[in-house]
Amino acid sequence: MPLKNIAAIVLAAGQGKRMKSNLPKVLHPVLGQPMLAYVLESLSMAGFERPIVVVGHGGDQVVDFIKDRAQIAWQREQLGTGHAVRCAMPLLEGFEGDVIITNGDVPLVPPNCYVNLVTARRKRDYAALISSIVLEKPASYGRIKRDPIGDVEGIVEFRDANDDEVLIREVNSGTYCFNAADLRESIDKIKNHNAQGEYYLTDTISHLKKMGRGVGAVIHPEESDFLGINDPADMALVEGKLGDRVKYQILSSGVRIDDPASVRIEPGVQIGPRTRILSGVTLEGKTVIGADCVIGPHVTLSDVKIEDSTIVSPHLISRNRRG
Protein backbone atom coordinates (compact mmCIF):
# COMPACT_ATOMS: atom_id res chain seq x y z
CA MET A 1 0.00 0.00 0.00
CA PRO A 2 1.46 3.42 -0.95
CA LEU A 3 2.54 5.65 1.89
CA LYS A 4 0.26 8.59 2.68
CA ASN A 5 0.81 11.86 4.57
CA ILE A 6 4.51 12.00 3.84
CA ALA A 7 6.81 14.89 3.07
CA ALA A 8 10.54 15.21 2.49
CA ILE A 9 13.16 17.89 2.95
CA VAL A 10 16.40 17.66 0.98
CA LEU A 11 19.29 19.76 2.26
CA ALA A 12 21.12 21.11 -0.80
CA ALA A 13 22.31 24.59 0.12
CA GLY A 14 25.99 23.90 0.76
CA GLN A 15 28.80 25.30 -1.32
CA GLY A 16 30.97 22.20 -1.32
CA LYS A 17 34.29 24.02 -1.03
CA ARG A 18 36.31 20.81 -1.26
CA MET A 19 34.97 20.20 -4.76
CA LYS A 20 37.14 23.17 -5.87
CA SER A 21 34.46 24.20 -8.36
CA ASN A 22 32.09 27.08 -9.01
CA LEU A 23 29.29 24.61 -9.73
CA PRO A 24 26.94 23.99 -6.76
CA LYS A 25 27.95 20.71 -5.18
CA VAL A 26 24.63 18.93 -5.72
CA LEU A 27 24.81 19.63 -9.47
CA HIS A 28 28.13 17.85 -9.99
CA PRO A 29 27.50 14.96 -12.38
CA VAL A 30 27.80 11.40 -11.15
CA LEU A 31 27.67 8.90 -14.01
CA GLY A 32 26.11 11.51 -16.28
CA GLN A 33 23.50 13.00 -13.92
CA PRO A 34 23.71 15.60 -11.13
CA MET A 35 23.97 13.85 -7.78
CA LEU A 36 20.76 15.61 -6.69
CA ALA A 37 18.86 13.86 -9.50
CA TYR A 38 19.45 10.47 -7.89
CA VAL A 39 18.17 11.68 -4.52
CA LEU A 40 15.00 13.12 -6.08
CA GLU A 41 14.43 9.96 -8.13
CA SER A 42 14.83 7.72 -5.08
CA LEU A 43 12.37 9.84 -3.08
CA SER A 44 9.91 9.78 -5.98
CA MET A 45 10.11 5.98 -6.19
CA ALA A 46 9.41 5.85 -2.42
CA GLY A 47 6.25 7.91 -2.90
CA PHE A 48 7.47 11.45 -2.14
CA GLU A 49 6.12 13.27 -5.16
CA ARG A 50 7.22 16.89 -4.55
CA PRO A 51 9.87 17.11 -1.85
CA ILE A 52 11.18 20.40 -0.53
CA VAL A 53 14.72 21.18 -1.62
CA VAL A 54 16.56 23.73 0.48
CA VAL A 55 18.86 25.76 -1.79
CA GLY A 56 21.45 28.39 -1.04
CA HIS A 57 24.86 28.56 -2.70
CA GLY A 58 24.30 28.69 -6.45
CA GLY A 59 20.60 28.34 -5.73
CA ASP A 60 19.43 29.80 -9.03
CA GLN A 61 21.27 27.06 -10.91
CA VAL A 62 19.81 24.39 -8.64
CA VAL A 63 16.30 25.80 -9.11
CA ASP A 64 16.77 25.77 -12.90
CA PHE A 65 17.70 22.11 -12.73
CA ILE A 66 14.87 21.09 -10.40
CA LYS A 67 12.10 22.82 -12.39
CA ASP A 68 8.76 21.43 -11.14
CA ARG A 69 10.08 18.25 -9.52
CA ALA A 70 10.25 19.81 -6.06
CA GLN A 71 9.26 22.78 -3.95
CA ILE A 72 11.99 25.29 -3.18
CA ALA A 73 13.01 26.78 0.16
CA TRP A 74 15.82 29.33 0.27
CA GLN A 75 18.53 29.35 2.92
CA ARG A 76 20.09 32.73 2.22
CA GLU A 77 22.69 32.28 4.96
CA GLN A 78 24.22 28.88 5.64
CA LEU A 79 23.75 28.68 9.41
CA GLY A 80 23.66 24.93 9.85
CA THR A 81 21.41 21.96 9.16
CA GLY A 82 18.86 22.97 11.77
CA HIS A 83 18.58 26.43 10.22
CA ALA A 84 18.13 24.83 6.78
CA VAL A 85 15.18 22.80 8.07
CA ARG A 86 13.70 25.92 9.65
CA CYS A 87 13.79 27.57 6.24
CA ALA A 88 11.69 24.71 4.85
CA MET A 89 9.10 24.60 7.63
CA PRO A 90 6.80 27.37 6.26
CA LEU A 91 6.07 25.07 3.30
CA LEU A 92 4.84 22.44 5.78
CA GLU A 93 2.49 24.73 7.69
CA GLY A 94 -0.53 22.72 8.76
CA PHE A 95 0.97 19.44 7.53
CA GLU A 96 0.48 16.40 9.77
CA GLY A 97 2.36 13.25 8.97
CA ASP A 98 5.92 12.04 8.45
CA VAL A 99 8.82 14.21 7.31
CA ILE A 100 11.92 12.60 5.86
CA ILE A 101 15.05 14.76 6.06
CA THR A 102 18.03 13.79 3.95
CA ASN A 103 20.97 15.34 2.10
CA GLY A 104 21.36 16.19 -1.55
CA ASP A 105 24.83 14.61 -1.78
CA VAL A 106 23.92 10.97 -1.01
CA PRO A 107 22.90 9.59 -4.42
CA LEU A 108 23.14 5.91 -3.44
CA VAL A 109 20.36 5.84 -0.83
CA PRO A 110 17.69 3.42 -2.14
CA PRO A 111 13.92 4.08 -1.97
CA ASN A 112 13.33 1.29 0.52
CA CYS A 113 15.42 3.12 3.11
CA TYR A 114 12.93 5.99 3.18
CA VAL A 115 9.95 3.64 3.17
CA ASN A 116 11.38 1.59 6.04
CA LEU A 117 12.00 4.72 8.11
CA VAL A 118 8.42 5.92 7.78
CA THR A 119 6.99 2.46 8.48
CA ALA A 120 9.16 1.92 11.55
CA ARG A 121 8.48 5.38 13.00
CA ARG A 122 4.74 4.88 12.71
CA LYS A 123 4.89 1.41 14.21
CA ARG A 124 6.67 2.60 17.35
CA ASP A 125 5.15 6.11 17.40
CA TYR A 126 8.57 7.69 17.77
CA ALA A 127 8.91 11.46 17.54
CA ALA A 128 11.94 10.84 15.34
CA LEU A 129 13.70 7.88 13.83
CA ILE A 130 17.30 7.99 12.66
CA SER A 131 18.73 5.87 9.89
CA SER A 132 22.01 4.67 11.35
CA ILE A 133 24.91 2.65 9.99
CA VAL A 134 27.57 0.54 11.67
CA LEU A 135 31.11 1.32 10.59
CA GLU A 136 34.34 -0.53 11.29
CA LYS A 137 36.09 2.85 11.49
CA PRO A 138 33.50 5.48 12.52
CA ALA A 139 35.97 8.37 12.12
CA SER A 140 34.30 11.72 12.82
CA TYR A 141 30.66 10.61 12.47
CA GLY A 142 28.23 11.39 15.29
CA ARG A 143 27.81 8.36 17.54
CA ILE A 144 24.37 6.91 18.30
CA LYS A 145 24.08 6.47 22.05
CA ARG A 146 21.26 4.13 23.13
CA ASP A 147 19.53 3.78 26.48
CA PRO A 148 18.98 0.43 28.29
CA ILE A 149 15.79 -0.37 26.31
CA GLY A 150 17.46 0.32 22.97
CA ASP A 151 15.99 3.74 22.18
CA VAL A 152 18.26 6.62 21.24
CA GLU A 153 19.55 8.54 24.23
CA GLY A 154 21.36 11.07 22.07
CA ILE A 155 23.75 11.73 19.23
CA VAL A 156 27.26 12.39 20.50
CA GLU A 157 29.40 14.42 18.13
CA PHE A 158 32.92 13.06 17.71
CA ARG A 159 34.55 16.18 19.11
CA ASP A 160 32.43 15.88 22.28
CA ALA A 161 32.74 12.11 22.76
CA ASN A 162 34.51 10.65 25.77
CA ASP A 163 36.83 7.64 25.60
CA ASP A 164 33.96 5.12 25.78
CA GLU A 165 31.71 6.96 23.32
CA VAL A 166 34.47 7.16 20.72
CA LEU A 167 34.38 3.34 20.58
CA ILE A 168 30.71 3.28 19.53
CA ARG A 169 30.47 2.00 15.94
CA GLU A 170 26.82 2.84 15.27
CA VAL A 171 26.72 6.31 13.73
CA ASN A 172 24.28 8.85 12.38
CA SER A 173 23.82 8.66 8.60
CA GLY A 174 22.24 12.13 8.39
CA THR A 175 18.85 10.83 7.22
CA TYR A 176 15.86 11.04 9.56
CA CYS A 177 12.11 10.58 9.76
CA PHE A 178 10.21 12.98 12.06
CA ASN A 179 6.65 13.28 13.15
CA ALA A 180 5.78 16.68 11.67
CA ALA A 181 4.35 18.12 14.89
CA ASP A 182 7.38 17.07 16.93
CA LEU A 183 9.75 18.42 14.29
CA ARG A 184 7.91 21.73 14.23
CA GLU A 185 8.15 22.09 18.01
CA SER A 186 11.74 20.94 18.45
CA ILE A 187 13.26 22.81 15.49
CA ASP A 188 12.14 26.10 17.01
CA LYS A 189 13.91 25.33 20.30
CA ILE A 190 17.44 24.62 19.11
CA LYS A 191 20.14 27.22 19.75
CA ASN A 192 23.42 28.09 18.11
CA HIS A 193 25.53 28.08 21.28
CA ASN A 194 28.53 26.36 19.73
CA ALA A 195 31.92 27.27 18.30
CA GLN A 196 30.53 27.49 14.75
CA GLY A 197 27.53 29.61 15.73
CA GLU A 198 25.28 27.23 13.76
CA TYR A 199 21.95 25.52 14.39
CA TYR A 200 22.34 21.75 14.27
CA LEU A 201 19.49 19.43 13.35
CA THR A 202 20.93 16.83 15.74
CA ASP A 203 20.10 19.13 18.66
CA THR A 204 16.41 18.40 18.06
CA ILE A 205 17.02 14.90 19.42
CA SER A 206 17.98 16.12 22.90
CA HIS A 207 14.98 18.47 22.93
CA LEU A 208 12.63 15.65 22.01
CA LYS A 209 14.05 13.50 24.80
CA LYS A 210 13.54 16.33 27.30
CA MET A 211 9.93 16.55 26.13
CA GLY A 212 9.52 12.87 26.99
CA ARG A 213 9.15 11.79 23.38
CA GLY A 214 10.71 8.59 22.09
CA VAL A 215 13.54 8.60 19.56
CA GLY A 216 14.75 5.48 17.79
CA ALA A 217 17.31 4.37 15.24
CA VAL A 218 17.11 1.75 12.50
CA ILE A 219 20.40 0.28 11.31
CA HIS A 220 20.61 0.34 7.53
CA PRO A 221 22.37 -2.88 6.44
CA GLU A 222 24.49 -1.44 3.61
CA GLU A 223 26.83 1.26 4.84
CA SER A 224 27.96 2.23 1.32
CA ASP A 225 24.41 3.44 0.51
CA PHE A 226 25.14 6.51 2.64
CA LEU A 227 28.43 7.46 1.02
CA GLY A 228 28.32 11.24 0.79
CA ILE A 229 30.21 13.34 -1.74
CA ASN A 230 32.46 16.07 -0.39
CA ASP A 231 35.36 16.06 -2.87
CA PRO A 232 36.35 14.57 -6.24
CA ALA A 233 37.71 11.44 -4.56
CA ASP A 234 34.32 10.78 -2.95
CA MET A 235 32.65 11.40 -6.30
CA ALA A 236 34.84 8.80 -8.03
CA LEU A 237 34.06 6.25 -5.30
CA VAL A 238 30.30 6.84 -5.50
CA GLU A 239 30.36 6.77 -9.30
CA GLY A 240 32.06 3.39 -9.16
CA LYS A 241 29.41 2.01 -6.80
CA LEU A 242 26.59 3.41 -8.93
CA GLY A 243 28.19 2.07 -12.09
CA ASP A 244 28.35 -1.40 -10.57
CA ARG A 245 24.61 -1.23 -9.84
CA VAL A 246 23.82 -0.20 -13.41
CA LYS A 247 25.95 -2.96 -14.90
CA TYR A 248 24.47 -5.58 -12.56
CA GLN A 249 20.96 -4.67 -13.72
CA ILE A 250 22.04 -4.87 -17.36
CA LEU A 251 23.76 -8.21 -16.86
CA SER A 252 20.60 -9.51 -15.19
CA SER A 253 18.61 -8.67 -18.32
CA GLY A 254 20.58 -11.05 -20.53
CA VAL A 255 23.35 -8.76 -21.76
CA ARG A 256 26.96 -9.96 -21.76
CA ILE A 257 29.69 -7.59 -20.60
CA ASP A 258 33.13 -9.07 -21.22
CA ASP A 259 35.17 -6.85 -18.87
CA PRO A 260 32.82 -4.94 -16.55
CA ALA A 261 35.65 -3.06 -14.82
CA SER A 262 36.63 -1.36 -18.09
CA VAL A 263 33.05 -0.56 -19.20
CA ARG A 264 31.17 2.62 -18.26
CA ILE A 265 27.38 2.67 -18.68
CA GLU A 266 25.15 5.55 -17.59
CA PRO A 267 21.75 4.87 -15.99
CA GLY A 268 19.68 6.11 -18.96
CA VAL A 269 21.13 3.54 -21.39
CA GLN A 270 18.95 0.67 -22.67
CA ILE A 271 20.42 -2.54 -24.07
CA GLY A 272 18.54 -5.47 -25.62
CA PRO A 273 19.08 -9.12 -24.67
CA ARG A 274 21.92 -11.24 -26.05
CA THR A 275 23.94 -8.14 -26.91
CA ARG A 276 27.65 -8.36 -26.12
CA ILE A 277 29.58 -5.38 -24.75
CA LEU A 278 33.35 -5.70 -25.22
CA SER A 279 36.08 -4.08 -23.14
CA GLY A 280 36.66 -0.34 -22.99
CA VAL A 281 33.11 0.62 -24.05
CA THR A 282 31.43 3.82 -22.83
CA LEU A 283 27.66 4.20 -23.22
CA GLU A 284 26.19 7.58 -22.31
CA GLY A 285 22.97 9.55 -22.16
CA LYS A 286 19.85 8.02 -23.72
CA THR A 287 21.68 5.51 -25.88
CA VAL A 288 19.47 2.61 -26.99
CA ILE A 289 21.06 -0.60 -28.26
CA GLY A 290 18.97 -3.37 -29.75
CA ALA A 291 19.17 -7.12 -29.23
CA ASP A 292 21.88 -9.45 -30.61
CA CYS A 293 24.44 -6.66 -31.14
CA VAL A 294 28.20 -6.61 -30.61
CA ILE A 295 29.65 -3.31 -29.36
CA GLY A 296 33.37 -2.60 -29.22
CA PRO A 297 35.98 -2.88 -28.06
CA HIS A 298 36.84 0.74 -27.17
CA VAL A 299 33.65 2.33 -28.47
CA THR A 300 31.93 5.46 -27.13
CA LEU A 301 28.24 5.97 -27.89
CA SER A 302 26.33 8.98 -26.60
CA ASP A 303 22.59 9.45 -27.28
CA VAL A 304 22.82 6.95 -30.14
CA LYS A 305 20.25 4.40 -31.31
CA ILE A 306 21.59 1.07 -32.58
CA GLU A 307 19.26 -1.34 -34.36
CA ASP A 308 19.06 -5.09 -33.61
CA SER A 309 21.85 -7.41 -34.85
CA THR A 310 24.32 -4.57 -35.42
CA ILE A 311 28.09 -4.90 -35.05
CA VAL A 312 29.72 -1.64 -33.97
CA SER A 313 33.36 -1.69 -35.00
CA PRO A 314 36.23 -0.96 -32.59
CA HIS A 315 37.42 2.55 -31.71
CA LEU A 316 34.24 4.33 -32.82
CA ILE A 317 33.02 7.52 -31.19
CA SER A 318 29.45 8.48 -32.10
CA ARG A 319 27.03 11.01 -30.66
CA ASN A 320 23.39 11.85 -31.38
CA ARG A 321 22.98 9.44 -34.27
CA ARG A 322 20.90 6.50 -35.43
CA GLY A 323 22.49 3.52 -37.08
Image: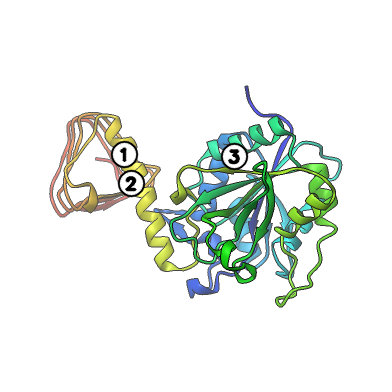
Asked if residue 99 can be seen in this view, the reply is yes
Residue placed under numbered mark 3 in the picture: 114
Q: Secondary structure at mark 3?
A: helix
Q: Residue furthest bottom?
A: 195
Q: Residue 223: horizontal and vertical position, in percent?
A: 46, 49
* Place of residue 136 in the rendered image (x, y in percent of width and height, measured from the top left): 43, 56
- Judge whether 308 appears above or below 22 on screen: above
Q: Which mark is residue 248?
A: 1
Nearest the eye: 160 or 252 = 160
Q: CA distance from mark 3 to mark 2?
A: 22 Å
> In the rendered structure, which amino acid carries the disc numbered 1?
Tyr
Q: CA gap, disc 2 to disc 1? A: 6 Å
Relative to 248, 194 lies left or right: right
Q: Nearer the viewer, residue 186 or 304?
A: 186
Q: Name the residue carrying label 2.
A: 244
Which of the marked residues, 3 or 2, is nearer the chain's N terminus? 3
Residue at 54% of width from left, 38% of height from top? 111
In the rendering, at what x and y percent does residue 263 appear? 24, 50
